[in-house]
């Protein structure tokens, strides 16, 4: 059963293009890297690092120090009814923690075919609009907001 605590990782390049991946189990469901913790006490950064590798093949340890940044923002949302079977009985809400990962242009992406079928790099505004989840779009816009120095 899944733990109702997850991470979302917005992967971006210095030109402000954002990586979106399309889910295998839902056509036209574009999103950033997401995933649940493997254990209730799993470190959030470790979970983000694991999910990035599992879904894109990107090895964060091979990137410059500080490439992965905790955005220190979390949201709580209702789990779609059709996906609640993955969670313990009675669980209807999930807490998601946001991260950002800066990668060099030309970074190779290796999708996990059982999870995702396609990927694309888009300008951040376009990526935010294309996300199926409103909160995923908000995470992208927050990353590139005027108050953010993470994208420099």
Image (tube, rainbow, N blue to C red):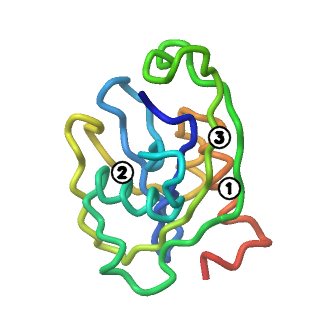
Q: Nearer the viewer, residue 99 or 138?
A: 99
Question: In the image shown, does 7 or 147 lie closer to the viewer?
Answer: 7
- Residue at screen point 50% across, 65% down: 45
- Disc 3 or disc 1, which is closer to the eye? 3
Residue 132 vs 87, above or below: the answer is below
* Residue in the image at 53% along x and 40% along y: 130
User: Which of the two labelled residues, at mark 3 and mark 2, occupies the earlier sequence position?
Assistant: 3
* 94 up-or-down from 111: above or below: above
Identify the residue at the far right of this view.
147
Looking at marks 2 and 1 on the same chain, the residue that comes earlier in the sequence is marked by: 2
Q: Left or right: 119 with respect to 142? A: left
| Distance CA(mark 2)–CA(mark 1) | 17 Å
- Label drawn at residue 95: 3
Under circle 1, the secondary element is helix
**What is the x, y in percent for residue 115?**
29, 36
Q: Which residue was labeled with disc 2? A: 120
Q: Position of residue 54 (x, y in %)?
A: 29, 52
Dot 1 corresponds to which residue? 141
Quarter location, residue 152: bottom right
Tell me the residue at 48%/13% (across/down): 82
Question: Label 3: how many residues lie within 10 Å, few (<14), some (14-19) or many (20+)?
Answer: some
């Amino acid at each position: 059963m899944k733990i109702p605590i997850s991470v979302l990782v917005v992967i971006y390049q210095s030109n402000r293009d954002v990586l979106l991946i399309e889910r295998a189990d839902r056509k036209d469901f574009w999103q950033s890297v997401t995933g649940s913790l493997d254990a209730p006490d799993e470190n959030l950064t470790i979970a983000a690092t694991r999910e990035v590798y599992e879904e894109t093949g990107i090895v964060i340890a091979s990137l410059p120090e500080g490439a992965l940044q905790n955005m220190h923002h979390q949201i709580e949302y209702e789990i779609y009814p059709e996906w609640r079977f993955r969670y313990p009985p009675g669980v209807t809400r999930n807490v998601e923690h946001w991260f950002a990962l800066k990668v060099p242009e030309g970074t190779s992406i290796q999708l996990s075919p059982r999870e995702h079928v396609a990927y694309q790099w888009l300008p951040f505004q376009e990526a935010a609009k294309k996300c199926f989840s409103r909160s995923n779009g908000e995470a992208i816009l927050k990353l590139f907001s005027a108050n953010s120095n993470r994208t420099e």
